[in-house]
Amino acid sequence: MRYDYVVQIRVLYFAVFRERLGRDSEPLELADGTTVRDAIATLATRHAAIAQLRGKFRIAVNEEFADDDTVLAERDELVLIPPVAGGAHHVVLTGEPLSLDRCIAAVRGPGMGGIVTFTGMVRVHSHGATIDHLEYEAYAPMAIREMTRLIVEIEAELPGVRVAVEHRTGVLAIGDLAVVIAAAAPHRAEAFTACRAMIDRLKDSVPIWKKEFGTGGEEWVGLGP
């Protein structure tokens, strides 16, 4: 396929990526207008290690964290960032659709005897009103840090447990997924306990706010009109 214009970027690899790929960088030629999502898809077809670790790393462009829709430009520097020490937990806050499969993949393992999941969806009725849509707003840096802290807390309380969470932001329609959680443990009782603890504590302490739009007008949940 030919393009009217292409851009050249540089991809940097660290830690597990550097070891598995046997290199610390490589050039990548992309079509003009290519997004981070497209670039990662291209790299995943080139390197099995990247395909295998999808959902377990973040992306930075020119030393700033970037989302999937970021458009890449000539001479950009794209970095695949694996989890850092103390931060190897699957915590996602995004305006894109959530993935329960990613959460399950993040917690499953040979020592786990059971995985319990929670999926929170936007429902059509709430407190007697018919809902048209919801809007979630978050203080993103603090929300990510707090969700990570809760996972660390729960995993310390229940040794052997692993927890993963994803939460949406932005406008959600009826039936959209707002939050997904997976908790794995050697035994089912601890998996159930961890999953319930995560959703309860998340709703209590993480700075994510929900606004309902429906027949009764619009309202920030928990505050009133």
Image: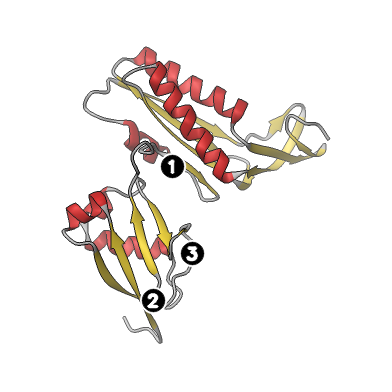
Horizontal and vertical percent position of residue 77: 38, 68
Residue at screen point 42% across, 63% down: 36
Residue at screen point 81% across, 31% down: 224
Q: Which residue is mark 2?
A: 75
- Can see residue 23? yes
Tag 3: residue type?
Answer: Thr
- Asked whether, in this view, residue 21 is left or right of residue 64, the answer is left
Q: Quadrant of residue 219?
A: top right
Tag 1: residue type?
Answer: Ser
Q: Which residue is mark 1?
A: 99
Q: Which residue is mark 3?
A: 70
- Asked whether, in this view, residue 124 is left or right of residue 25, the answer is right
Which quarter of the figure is the C terminus placed in?
top right
Q: Quadrant of residue 151?
A: top left
Nearer the camera: disc 2 or disc 3: 2
Horizontal and vertical percent position of residue 18: 22, 56
Residue at screen point 67% across, 38% down: 209
Q: Earlier in the sequence, mark 2 or mark 3?
A: 3
